[in-house]
Amino acid sequence: MITGGISLPSRFVARLKNIQADALIVILCAGFIGFLVNAFEPFGLEDDFDSSVSRAGNSIMAPLYGWVGGRVGQRDIMIVVIQEDTLAAFQDDTWPLPYRSQALLAQLIAERKPAALFLDFYYARYHDKPVEVDFWGDGDASPAGPATETGLESLARTLTTISQDFPVMIGPVVSATKQDETGLQPLVDRISASSNGSLMSVGVEHSGPPFYYYPMRDAGQRRQAAVELRNVWCKRQKSDCADFPEYEDDARLAVDWGFGTTPLMARYQPVKERALCGSGSFWMSVKAFARIVLHNLTRVLNDDDLRVYESCPYFDTIPAEWLVTPPPGLDLDELIKDRLVLVGVDLPYLSDYVPAPLYGPVPGVTLHAMALDNLITSGVAATKPAPVVWLGIDAADVWEMMIAFLSLIVLILFFTTPREESWVRRFLAFVHRSAVMFVLSICAALFASAVFHWPFVNFVAISGAGIAGFFVYRDIVQDGSDAAAVGQTAIRRNSNHD
């Protein structure tokens, strides 16, 4: 019992009775509008909004990623990127690298004994250019093969040779379809002849925009690079790895991104960037994350365009020219030995970039590395997009509408008060209800991520829909009910008076 002799359940019943048909009509209309927006929205604005909120939530959680399990994926993955300085080191001006230079690059990495090598190159058509550089200085005896061997034959032979020591993966290779398109056939033949599958062609696809999902298989039903690399990692761990549902056609990852430079990479960073990025502990990563966010917020004022990917890579990342001329003190064996090495391209004039939370545009090979890290870290619990229910509406949309409706009921039951006359009190009431709605929405987003393994649902839309519905109810329906009640009371008083 409480003051006034009215029990708590009775008060709930009384308030529920005040939610009249008009209020329910408002709520149902709002839900119908939400349905139309999700199902038939023609310009992609709703998807862009969902993607932006999901990326914002991922950015907030980035310093927490992987710390519970010790960031095993970060420890076992490293990236080599081909940049403009790399092309200069290989005495070439433009991408793609000649096949013989690709063979030399693979050989340089193989000498450091990695656990696996993935070349994120797509072999769609034959090309070749002469190569004059000889890093070994011994002419025809170099690992790239004799001068009489074509560049593609040299690449195919080199990949076959090093695949006897560890698995080697390359992007899709398009087979010849016409008599005069046999240039790539030596590479196709070498892959087909690989008896133990140590030399293979893997998928490199991803969806987007606005959602850059990572499928388990590409359109040609090849397993994606991250899936095959995780299989290699599992075999080396000599432990049972829970299989991700990679054989389902629609199985995809909604990649979670981590933040925080490794202690190993911090050794080779300038002091300023090392302090900015943090390494070694969780709290250092959180502090570095706060600095990056503050820098991005003030970027317009300080006119300093910091590329977070270059300054604070989550994985140990080196430019390919370091393999040719390593800087003083660099230990290539420590960086490469027994690790999963991914080689990609970071050239501004190519389109191989994806937007990553907090980092901005990153080379496509980083998406493969992060998807691999997700599979290593989370296995079957890796984040996946919510399944589609009907007409483009997915389970996350249904969850958002349901949470907005339930939160609106909570606000009506617990926070309905007569409208304040003072604008200050109105503003404070708005802030209070909005804060309550925002907390409820954040809790719903965290619950969906933890239990359903979905990306962050649109907690901003949930908050906005709930608070709008609440004030519509209070200012229109509730005030109308109060006015009607006052009118009825006046009529009864006049009747009694007469």
Image: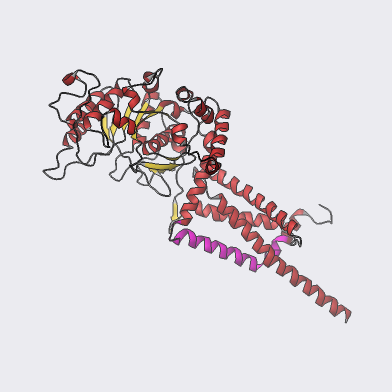
At 18% from the left and 19% from the top, the residue drawn is: 141
Q: Nearer the viewer, residue 287 or 32?
A: 287
Which residue sits furthest left? 179
Above/below status of 52 relative to 230: below
Is 83 situated left or right of 187 in this image? right
Residue 275: image location, x then y, percent: 54, 27
Q: How many marks?
A: 0
Is 27 situated left or right of 380 in this image? right
Above/below status of 454 relative to 423: above
At 67% from the left and 67% from the top, the residue drawn is: 476
Which residue sits furthest bottom? 498
Q: How is the image coloured?
A: secondary structure
Residue 176: image location, x then y, percent: 16, 42
Image quadrant containing the C terminus: bottom right
Q: Which residues are magenta?
A: 15-44
Q: Main secondary structure of the magenta part?
A: helix
Residue 232: image location, x then y, percent: 35, 28
Q: Nearer the viewer, residue 288 or 88?
A: 88
Is 216 situated left or right of 69 in this image? left
Which quadrant holds residue 43? bottom left
Which quadrant holds residue 425? bottom right
Which quadrant holds residue 375? top left
At 33% from the left and 22% from the top, the residue drawn is: 325
Above/below status of 97 relative to 45: above
Residue 473: image location, x then y, percent: 66, 63
State yes or no: residue 230 in magenta.
no
Is 281 situated left or right of 18 in this image? left
Q: Is residue 403 visible?
A: no
State yes or no: residue 17 in magenta.
yes
Q: Is residue 6 visible?
A: yes
